[in-house]
Amino acid sequence: MSLEKSEKIDNRNNIFPVMEEKEISLLFVGDLMFDRYIRQVAEKKGNEYIFSEVKDILSKEDLVIANLEGPITEFPSKSVNTVPGQGGHLVFTLDKSLASTLKNNNIKLVNLGNNHIGNFGGEGIRQTKNFLDEAGVSYFGYTGDDSENNYTILNLGGARVGFVNYNQFVSGSSENAKKDILEIRDKVDFLVLYTHWDAEYKAEPKESTKKLAREFIDSGVDLLIGTHPHVIQSKEEYKNKMIYYSLGDFVFDQYFSPETKRGLGVRVKLFEKGQRVEFEEINFSLRTNGQTVRDDEK
């Protein structure tokens, strides 16, 4: 299916055309960070090198959705050549060339609602949106700016799919997410909540996270996808809806444990405008050469 035409649907940055109804295949992946070591590899070998081992997987989907872990800006990196605990090590900016690389690899929707999107302030967020707009990559997510809609609605294969974000790291995000869910529930056929939450490096989510996840499902969410812990967490079926608490990382340079070098992709196939849903899980490994690869061993 072609996704090259542009049409505004309920939101400021929807780039997808209305299509005849068909089976839709969405692939959700986790945190994507292109600074520090990943930036250095990309500068030597090119952005495409990072994705080259998974490009065929990404290209077969109708849409790939990732968490953009940091702003895309023209500012110089503060994190390159730093070590843990050193100033700037956790301050990310992604090179402006990444926006078109995302588009080239079918990552045409990204979540901005996370704890690193504001690393270069409001100007960093502004530049991020401009570079994504120029590249034709859509976005959503709660960055703390109440003046904008933080969700998006896309027409995919005749189905209207809504994407809402919960960002644990911005005050009021839970209320904002529930407001967005209520606002668009009747406007969409299938509603996805993409969260950034819970504790880093913990294989099992907190009980408070599980409680909140179920509240979101009760509010009208059809599928919940979680990120931020940098490891794969458990999943749960609740009221016939799936909750993936954390997909781990998709592109990152955290090679210090087997758990942080693994990521999960969730392929979601929607039939009959989301009335029937099928899931397939894809295991990824993050290699120390900067590449992400498919890993058929769990």
Image (cartoon, grey):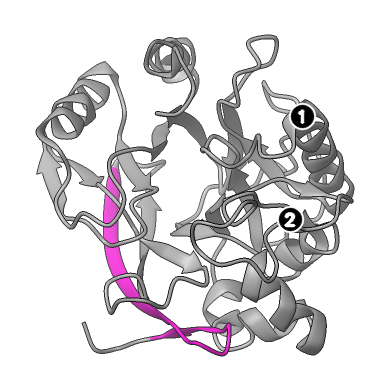
Q: Identity of the amino acid at label 1?
A: Lys
| SS at mark 1 in the image | loop
| SS at mark 2 in the image | loop
Disc 1 target residue: 8
Q: How many marks?
A: 2
Q: In the image, residue 170 lies at what x, y percent?
A: 49, 22
In the image, what residue occupies the spot 37% across and 58% down? Answer: 269
Quadrant showing the C terminus: bottom left
Q: In the image, residue 296 lies at what x, y percent?
A: 29, 88
| Left or right, residue 114 beside residue 70 | left
The numbered disc on residue 78 is 2
Q: Is residue 221 above or below residue 243?
A: above
Main SS, magenta region, reads strand
* Pick the front one: 151 or 30: 30
| Left or right, residue 225 beside residue 93 | left
In the image, what residue occupies the spot 64% across and 86% down? Answer: 52
Mark 1 or mark 2, whichever is nearer to me: 2
Give the magenta range.
Answer: 276-294
In the image, what residue occupies the spot 42% across and 31% down? Answer: 189
* Pick the front one: 120 or 241: 120
